[in-house]
Image (spheres, rainbow, N blue to C red):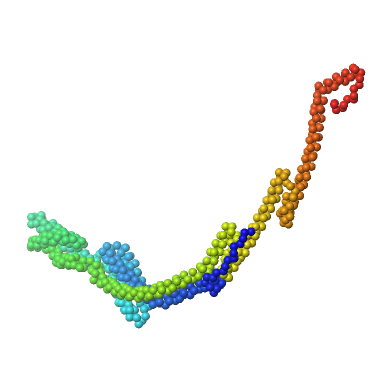
Amino acid sequence: MSELAPPPTRRRRLGPWFDDRPIGVKLAMGLGAMVALTLVVIAIGLVGGARATASIDQTVDQRAPTALASARAQADMLRMVGEVRGYLALGDATFRDAYRTAATAFEADLASLVALAEKAPADDPIGARLRGDLASLRAAYAQWQPLPDQLFAIRDDQLRREPALRILIDEATPQIAAILDGIAEATRLQSLRPPTAQNLAILGDLGAFNGAFLSEVSGLRGYVTTGRSLFKFEYQANQTVADTAWQALLGRRPILDAAENAALDDAAAALRRFSPMPASMFEFVEGDRSREDLFQFRTEAVPLADRMVATLDGLATSEQQLLGADLATGRDGLAAARLQALVLGAILVAVAILVAFAITRGVAGPIGRLTSAAQRIRGGDLSYRAEVESRDELGTLASAFNAMTGQLAETIETQQEYIREVGVVTDAAVAVEASEFQPGALGGVAARTDALGALARTFERMASEVKAREERLRAQVRELRIEIDEARQAKKVAEITDTDYFRSLRGRAQDLRRIVGTDGPPEDPSGG
């Protein structure tokens, strides 16, 4: 057994107040200190951030939602105005449906603003101003609500939508029909008269007026429906031709009969009623009210919408300013809290480093050295012993480790001795196989009292018996060889005497004996 290393000395690191305490207590002390400092940091952070939190809460609960709802309501109102304008311009039902959707969203935004205003304290001047602005906004919206449906109804009714066309259809068309009927009646009566040059001239004047008047009406209708100046020019040119033809007809009235003059009187009365109507139509076509729906939209709906948008813009701007002020206050509070957190965090980091250093020296260091001792012992240095550095669990573990190492060294030495004596028994077995075994060769091993000694004694007895049996077997083999040689000779004699030739010789010999008169010896039954 190798010589043991000198017993290690017990060294102090942080003093017995820490070194000799259990590991759990050490960890609890370190973690407790860190937790206590963390709680202090949290408490100071909470106190320092209280103002910032209050400002942020006000921003989150009041300012930001109000500003956002105001901006959404403003956008929805602009969408409503745009969708109404689109439907009035194009007549596409998609714009009307989109208006309904935008109106629903605007009403939801308005309801959100009202709810936010109700949350503000009664003595808050900002809340009071918000409630006043919302009251005026709701009043304006109440005026606005019926307007889009009215405008849609006007847009869907072309005669209500276009005043000039309404005059043309409802007022001018009956007069135009009366004029054409009177001219048609005069033409019919004139055509019944003899076709003299004078009568044919009258028919020509009637036809000229009728054609020019129809072209005049066509140009008027085109200008009223499209507003293109080309149609107005057509109207004016044909009006001049029609007036000239009409004056020619009036000059021929003395030569007309009573029925023809009556027909011209009807036409003249209708023409007098019709004559001022084109000017009224032109006034509508060329003025602001060419489209009644667009005129009412510009004069009634748009001002109301502008007023509501302005109110919402004022709300949004005011709330954004308040939001900026609250955010500035919150930033200042957060900056102060952040500075406090940085200072206390630095202190906490320093304490954590100290705790980590203490735990490293009190726990991790001894564990590392104990691990190094285990590595040396695993490498075969069973004489090395771990250092017992404290009275805690690690010290107990080091002591138990040293005791285990000593027991392991003794066990290994015993096993090595056992293996050597097993080798002696193995060598004896080889000697027995080579017939070189000497009695007494296992005397040392046979003296053991364990199973190996019993095995050695049994093996030695068996080896002696094997040797004795071998000697007896050799003697028997020698005797067996003699018997085998005799049997082999008898077999050779039998092989000679059993041949036909030998029997023939034996018969001749008997014949010779009889001839000579001598009796030979008795015949061997075996043929010998």
Viewer-proximal residue among 291 and 328: 328
Left or right position of 262 against 434: left
Residue at 28% of width from left, 64% of height from top? 87
The answer to whether residue 44 shows anywhere in this view is yes
The extreme top residue here reads 515
Q: Position of residue 271 (x, y in %)?
A: 14, 65
Q: Quadrant of residue 23?
A: bottom right
Q: Can residue 63 be spotted in the picture?
A: no
Quadrant of the rendered structure where residue 7 is?
bottom right
Residue 242 placement (x, y as % from top left): 12, 60
Q: Residue furthest bottom?
A: 123
Percent coordinates x, y for residue 19 in the rendering? 54, 71
For image coordinates 16% across by 59% down, the residue present is 230
Residue 122 % position (x, y): 36, 81
Is 243 placed left or right of 433 in the picture?
Answer: left
Quadrant the C terminus occupies: top right
